[in-house]
């Protein structure tokens, strides 16, 4: 029998259309998987089973009549607990957020999913306010890696990545302010896209400003394109949202990479120490792009280390998001978050504007780079998943999570589309990710190249089971 939890959204919808299975069956399977994996990986802050089954039954009746509602009718989805989901508290991983309230509004991306008939099965874990590249919080504890529960799932969308990897819904909405969909995608062996800033509208506005993106986390690039066709449209609540895309992302998937100009930067010009197994897996995938007809050049973008400017922007945002808290509430915060909030509150307006200057110059340089190259390829991360429950790998010498994510956060500063594609595993069986980056507004190229890697068998959705099952 077909294992429904291992199917992509595209395949599920095809089965609904043909009458091979129903939204109720798929939703029950996803909920059962979510309950089964929760004790070991801790991917969820809450499941919404009753509401999910109600929506699934309504979807099943629409499919029976041959009148599906939109592009995702009956597909089980999860939502990171940073984004508003009507009827469920959004606690942002924090004990300082009061669960009492009306909770009567959807975030724009969630609203689009609801309009297209998606079935919400639950909210996924996040570090407090999404502040770091791993997923643990005082509220919900530690989220663990599907391949090895002693390791981290990454973050800040770690719960979403673990849920998708283990079959608790093929689609999830994550957020990415410095790598937060790409980091856990790389560690958990799934696909994730950080779209061009503004392509997916965000409301309420993030305290981290225009660093914060909303993006799809899926089993493959085709599912991400389908999800982008749903969520990638403007919403009046986000003044910075882009106009509608010129066409459907799903229509542009099959163009392949023949003739594309690809820049391959294995280590950002020697600035990053990349683990050998990671470097080999990424290089093999790049060689396959060349075999598929891409013109590959090993070269490096002009990325002067922007970490201090990023910290100014990021830590200031953290200080802003917690500004309203009193002393007793602050005592409830993650100690690391409390520390960066203190630092962020010390920056002046001139410090912040100086960081904006660095950001704008970085964006200018990357714009010029993409005059020559259609795509940039790097490792998503220089390492594979490390011990769960810590911000940085032990013995690494890093102070903050940005020390081990040098390939991800610069492209939040430049607002470019960037995706993580699973391209192998290390000797411990831990996933390795490749990052694809394109010029702003060329999300279609990122999805197209990623789809080519899946079609060529370089990337794989994989068949995972919870460790020990």
Image (tube, grey):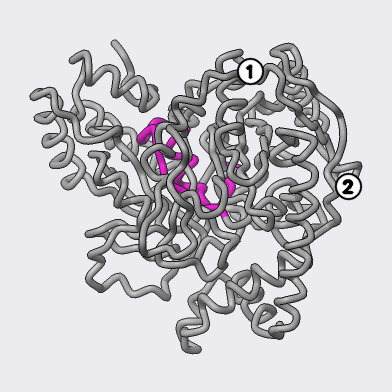
Q: Is residue 357 magenta?
A: no
| For residue 313, above or below residue 366 | below
Question: In the image, is 244 to the left or to the right of 420?
Answer: left
Residue drawn 77% across the image and 75% down it: 354
Task: Say which residue label 2 marks.
Answer: 271
- Label 1 near label 2: C-beta < 8 Å? no
Q: Position of residue 145 (x, y in %)?
A: 54, 40
Question: Which stretch did the figure color magenta?
Answer: 150-176
As drawn, the residue found furthest toward the bottom would be 327
- In the displayed structure, does residue 342 sit left or right of residue 117? right
**Quadrant showing the C terminus:** top left
Hey, which quadrant is residue 382 in on the image?
Answer: top right
Q: CA distance from mark 2 to mark 1?
A: 27 Å
Q: Is residue 425 left or right of 243 when viewed as pictured? A: right
| Residue 163 included in the magenta stretch of the image | yes
The answer to which of 362 and 412 lies nearer the viewer is 362
Residue under label 1: 458
Instruction: Mark yes or no: residue 114 visible.
Output: yes
Task: Tell me if I can see residue 135 in this picture.
Answer: no
């Amino acid at each position: 029998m077909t294992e429904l939890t291992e199917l992509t959204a595209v395949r599920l919808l095809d089965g609904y259309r043909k009458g091979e299975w129903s939204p109720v069956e798929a939703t029950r399977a996803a909920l059962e998987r979510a309950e089964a994996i929760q004790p070991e990986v801790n991917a969820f802050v809450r499941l919404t089973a009753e509401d999910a089954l109600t929506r699934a039954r309504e979807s099943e009746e629409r499919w029976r009549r041959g009148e599906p509602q939109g592009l995702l009718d009956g597909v089980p989805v999860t939502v990171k607990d940073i984004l508003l989901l009507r009827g469920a508290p959004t606690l942002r991983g924090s004990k300082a957020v009061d669960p009492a309230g009306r909770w009567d509004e959807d975030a724009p991306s969630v609203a689009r999913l609801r309009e297209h008939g998606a079935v919400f099965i639950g909210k996924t874990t996040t570090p407090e306010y999404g502040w770091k590249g791993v997923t643990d919080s005082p509220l919900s504890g530690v989220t663990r890696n599907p391949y090895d529960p002693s390791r981290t799932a990454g973050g800040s969308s770690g719960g979403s990545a673990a849920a998708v990897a283990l079959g608790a819904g093929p689609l999830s909405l994550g957020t990415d302010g410095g790598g937060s969909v790409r980091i856990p995608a790389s560690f958990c062996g799934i696909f994730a896209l950080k779209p061009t800033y503004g392509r997916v509208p965000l409301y309420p506005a993030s305290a981290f400003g225009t660093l914060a993106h909303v993006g799809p986390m899926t089993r493959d690039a085709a599912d991400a394109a389908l999800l982008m066709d749903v969520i990638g449209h403007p919403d009046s609540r986000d003044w910075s949202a882009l106009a509608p895309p010129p066409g459907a992302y799903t229509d542009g998937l099959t163009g392949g990479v023949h003739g594309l100009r690809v820049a391959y930067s294995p280590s950002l010009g020697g600035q990053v120490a990349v683990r050998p197994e990671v470097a080999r897996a990424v290089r093999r995938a790049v060689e396959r792009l060349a075999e598929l007809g891409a013109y590959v050049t090993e070269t490096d973008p002009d990325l002067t280390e922007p970490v201090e400017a990023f910290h100014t922007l990021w830590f200031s945002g953290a200080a802003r998001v917690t500004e309203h808290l009193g002393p007793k509430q602050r005592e409830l915060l993650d100690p690391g978050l409390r520390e960066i909030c203190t630092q962020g509150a010390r920056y002046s307006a001139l410090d912040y504007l100086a960081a904006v200057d660095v950001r704008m110059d970085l964006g200018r340089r990357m714009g010029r780079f993409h005059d020559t190259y259609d795509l940039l390829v790097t490792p998503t991360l220089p390492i594979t998943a490390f011990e769960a429950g810590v911000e940085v790998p032990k013995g690494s010498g890093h102070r903050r999570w940005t020390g081990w994510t040098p390939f991800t956060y610069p492209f939040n500063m430049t607002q470019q589309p960037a995706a993580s594609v699973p391209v192998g595993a290390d000797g411990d069986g831990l996933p390795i990710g490749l990052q694809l980056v394109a010029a702003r507004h060329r999300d279609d190229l990122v999805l197209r190249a990623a789809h080519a890697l899946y079609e060529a068998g370089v990337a794989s959705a994989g068949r995972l089971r919870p460790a020990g099952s």
